[in-house]
Image (tube, rainbow, N blue to C red):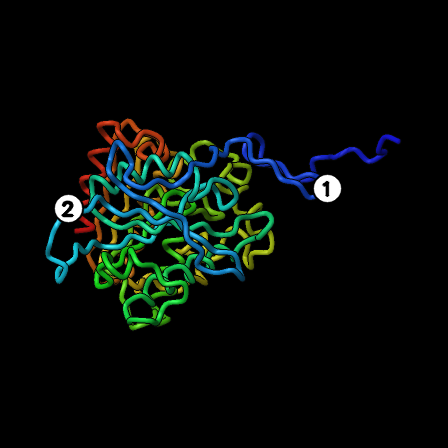
């Protein structure tokens, strides 16, 4: 007998995500899975997937630069470590997608860093703040490799080739928002082995507030804009709503940005990106807070949101990668 209760959409952000009455979720814009690879034929970069935690479920894809053959076993090749949080509004995309796999093969080959790309739990199945906790736990796991036999599920690439004195965090879009929240936590909590974050990379970071700024105010309809709606979808129970300090770091109730737990910050924006003004706004907020560190703002003209992720081999993406290489080295 045919069901009298057809599957219905109960929540959606059109073209991005649909939640149905039976609990299933569709993510139309999500790029397909891409497997890891050893010695990528184009870049020589190797990658593998690892489990950080079973409960909660947190995993990652690790990228290792091509190693130069050497007979010097006493001085292995060591690289800075970038713990990375992917974008996608907290509810789509993956560290295991073809999109990010292609990007990091190119990025790692150009920057000579180890990347730990975190696969965190996503909304709506796991509303915020779940992903913030997952990404903090992933950073703690990386830091725990600083002392021998201290890490759970320790990774030989990090032990043999990771420079635990040079740990960075980074992310794009919603991942840039995660970078902020992880860096704030690092300013008030101690990481394993007293590891310090050297620097943080904010690529087209996602922030919002009840008061529109810049181009947001010109266009009108701020409460119906995608950035505004994404927050309500990903964190429907957020205290303070869109002015929660996790999404509005300059809210009256937000802690001072002077506690950001890193020594230097790189914020990159794109002129045609709807989030461009928020990146500049955040940068100005950090500068005015009295935070003691090196702060750099980089803007690319004529580009849109996360252009470097979609087209990692383009001229402008390569220019950004070279700026990041200097920041990471």
Q: Indicate which label's residue lies in the foreground, 2 or 1.
A: 2
Can you give x and y, in whole percent of width and height, for residue 15 in the image? 55, 30
Q: Is residue 137 visible to us here?
A: yes
Q: Quadrant of residue 212?
A: top left
Instruction: Return the residue nearer the eye: 224 or 21.
Output: 21
Residue highlighted by disc 1: 22
| Quadrant (top left, top right, bottom left, bottom right) of the N terminus | top right
- Does dot 1 land on a helix, a strand or a loop? loop
Q: Quadrant of residue 317?
A: top left
| Residue pointed to by mark 2 | 68
For residue 269, side relative to residue 243 (left or right): left
Q: Is residue 27 left or right of residue 44?
A: right
Q: Locate residue 110, reporting x and y percent.
A: 20, 39
Could you tell me which secondary element the residue under label 2 belongs to? loop
Label whose residue precedes the other's in the sequence (2 or 1): 1
How many numbered discs? 2
Residue in the picture at 37% in, 71% down = 189
Give the x, y percent position of residue 203. Answer: 32, 43
- What residue is at 36 percent from the left and 31 percent from the top? 310
Q: Position of residue 302 (x, y in %)?
A: 28, 26
168 in relation to 322, above or below: below
Q: Nearest the camera: 169 or 223?
A: 169
- Cα separation between marks 2 and 1: 52 Å
């Amino acid at each position: 007998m045919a069901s009298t209760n057809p599957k219905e959409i109960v929540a959606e952000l059109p073209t991005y995500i649909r939640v149905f009455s039976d609990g299933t979720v569709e993510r139309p814009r999500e790029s397909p899975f891409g497997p890891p690879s050893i010695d990528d034929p184009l870049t020589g970069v190797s990658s593998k997937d690892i489990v950080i935690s079973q409960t909660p479920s947190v995993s990652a894809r690790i990228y290792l630069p091509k190693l130069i053959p050497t007979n010097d076993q006493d001085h292995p090749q060591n690289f800075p470590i970038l713990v990375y949080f992917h974008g996608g509004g907290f509810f789509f995309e993956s560290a295991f997608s073809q999109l990010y796999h292609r990007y990091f093969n190119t990025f790692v080959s150009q920057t000579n860093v180890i990347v730990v790309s975190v696969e965190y739990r996503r909304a709506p199945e796991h509303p915020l703040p779940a992903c913030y906790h997952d990404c903090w736990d992933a950073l703690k796991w990386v830091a725990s490799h600083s002392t021998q036999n201290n890490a759970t599920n320790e990774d030989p690439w990090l032990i043999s080739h990771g420079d635990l004195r040079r740990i960075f965090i980074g992310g794009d879009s919603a991942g840039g928002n995660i970078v902020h929240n992880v860096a704030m936590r690092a300013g008030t909590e101690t990481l394993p082995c007293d590891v310090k974050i050297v620097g943080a990379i904010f690529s087209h970071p996602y922030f919002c507030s009840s008061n529109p700024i810049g181009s947001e105010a010109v266009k009108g309809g701020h409460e119906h804009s995608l950035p505004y709606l994404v927050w309500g979808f990903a964190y429907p129970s957020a205290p303070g709503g869109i002015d929660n300090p996790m999404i509005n770091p300059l809210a009256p109730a937000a802690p001072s940005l002077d506690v950001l737990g890193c020594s230097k910050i790189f914020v990159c924006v794109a002129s045609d990106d709807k989030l461009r003004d928020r990146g500049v706004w955040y940068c100005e907020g950090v500068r005015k807070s009295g935070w003691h560190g090196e702060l750099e703002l980089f803007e690319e003209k004529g580009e849109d949101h996360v252009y470097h992720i979609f087209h990692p081999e383009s001229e402008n993406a390569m220019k950004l990668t070279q700026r990041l290489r200097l920041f990471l080295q």
